[in-house]
């Protein structure tokens, strides 16, 4: 028993924990946090590339608007008579394209009249329905000769009753 109580001096020094291990862990965790923050900031800057206002102006500078006469059509509702009055402006690739497309006004109006009169009130009464109609207008316009020069369609008046 006396031997068990006596410990060599080397074992007494090894018993207390070393503070270097904790310090090493703290340094590694801090370095890891800094690397993650820098990587996250870099990813944010790269992935959220907002175009500057100058680029937006240059992008839309060469665009021109082509206003069409208002359309008044019967809707395709079977149970009642409903009407749609809509005015559509087309965004085209420049003034030269406007002059070329003005020659195709009868074709453009014909396609739009057939499209608009094929819709029911339920198809166009919701915002989603209006967005879908706008998408279909652009699809019909792109199918026309010189229709690829049309890049947007805007409803400037929209009344359904």
Image (cartoon, grey):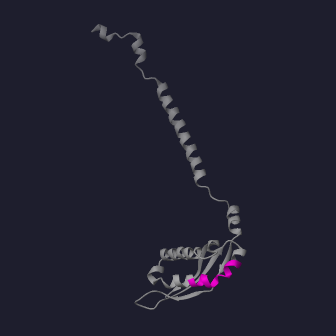
**Nearest the eye: 44 or 138:** 138
Magenta residue check for 97: no
Q: Is 5 rendered above or below residue 122?
A: above
Q: Is residue 104 magenta?
A: yes
Please, is residue 112 above or below residue 142 in the view?
below
Picture coordinates of residue 8, whole percent (x, y): 38, 9
Depth order, front residue of 88/56? 88
Residue span colored magenta: 99-110
User: Is residue 106 toward the left or the right of residue 160 in the image?
Assistant: right
Residue 86, picture quadrant: bottom right
State whether the magenta stretch is mostly helix, strand or loop: helix
Residue under the image location 52 percent in, 74 percent down? 131
Left or right: 86, with 82 as reference point:
right
The percent coordinates of residue 3 (x first, y second) are 30, 8
Would you place residue 35 above or below residue 84 in this image? Answer: above
Note whether 80 is above or below 53 in the view shown.
below
Q: Which residue is depicted at the point 67% across and 60% down? A: 52
Quarter that holds the N terminus: top left
Relative horizontal placement of residue 54, taking residue 143 as reference (left or right): right
Measured from the top left, where is residue 55 in percent x and y?
69, 61
């Amino acid at each position: 028993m006396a031997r068990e109580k006596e410990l060599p001096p080397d074992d007494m020094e090894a018993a207390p924990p070393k503070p270097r291990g904790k310090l090493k862990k703290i340094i590694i965790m801090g370095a890891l946090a800094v690397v993650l923050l820098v990587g996250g900031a870099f990813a944010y800057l790269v992935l959220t590339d907002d175009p500057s206002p100058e680029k937006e102006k240059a992008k839309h500078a060469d665009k021109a608007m082509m206003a069409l006469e208002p359309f008044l059509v019967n809707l395709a509702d079977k149970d009642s008579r409903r009407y749609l009055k809509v005015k559509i402006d087309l965004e085209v690739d420049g003034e030269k394209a406007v002059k070329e497309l003005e020659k195709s006004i009868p074709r453009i109006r014909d396609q739009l009249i057939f499209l608009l009169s094929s819709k029911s009130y339920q198809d166009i009464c919701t915002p989603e329905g209006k967005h879908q109609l706008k998408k279909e207008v652009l699809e019909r316009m792109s199918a026309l000769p010189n229709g690829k020069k049309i890049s947007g369609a805007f409803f400037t008046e929209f009344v359904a009753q």
